[in-house]
Amino acid sequence: MADDLKDKIRENAEGPAKAAGDAGSVEQHKLTDQIEADKYLSSKDAAKSKTRGLRFNKLVPPGID
């Protein structure tokens, strides 16, 4: 899903902000709003993971067995 969202953000950034035609007009969301939505969805995915962004390691100095 994250890849799809990144692709959508890229498509929206390349396309016009507004478009008008015979059928009506279309306006996309602001890029800043799209980036905020991406960050929000990424944070939800991170919260669902088992590690929740934390990783614990045991550090052992060299020479100590």
Image (cartoon, rainbow, N blue to C red):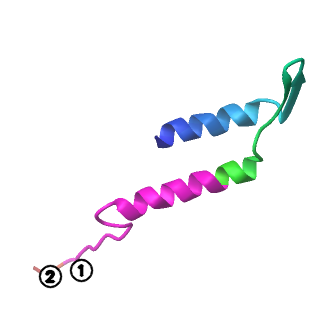
The furthest residue to the left? 65
Q: Are marks 2 and 1 in contact (CB under 8 Å)?
A: yes
Which residue corresponds to mark 2?
A: 64
Which residue corresponds to mark 1?
A: 61
**Left or right of 21, for residue 44:** left
Q: Residues within 10 Å of mark 2 (few under 14, many from 20)?
A: few
Rendered image quadrant of residue 23: top right
In the rendered image, residue 37, in percent from the top left (x then y), is placed at 61, 53
Q: Amino acid at mark 1?
A: Pro
In the rendered image, residue 50, in percent from the top left (x then y), is placed at 28, 63
Q: Amino acid at mark 2?
A: Ile
Q: How many marks?
A: 2
Secondary-structure class at tag 1: loop
For the point 46% across and 40% down, the residue is: 1
Q: Residues within 10 Å of mark 1 (few under 14, many from 20)?
A: few
The residue stretch that appears in magenta: 36-62
Give the spatial CA distance, label 2 vs label 1. Answer: 6 Å
For the point 41% across and 60% down, the residue is: 46
Q: Is residue 30 magenta?
A: no
Residue nearest the viewer, comparing 49 with 18: 18
In the rendered image, residue 15, in percent from the top left (x then y), is placed at 77, 29
In the rendered image, residue 59, in percent from the top left (x then y), is placed at 25, 77
Q: Tell me if residue 12 comes above or below residue 54 in the rendering.
A: above
For the point 58% across and 51% down, the residue is: 38
Q: Tell me if residue 41 comes above or below residue 61 in the rendering.
A: above
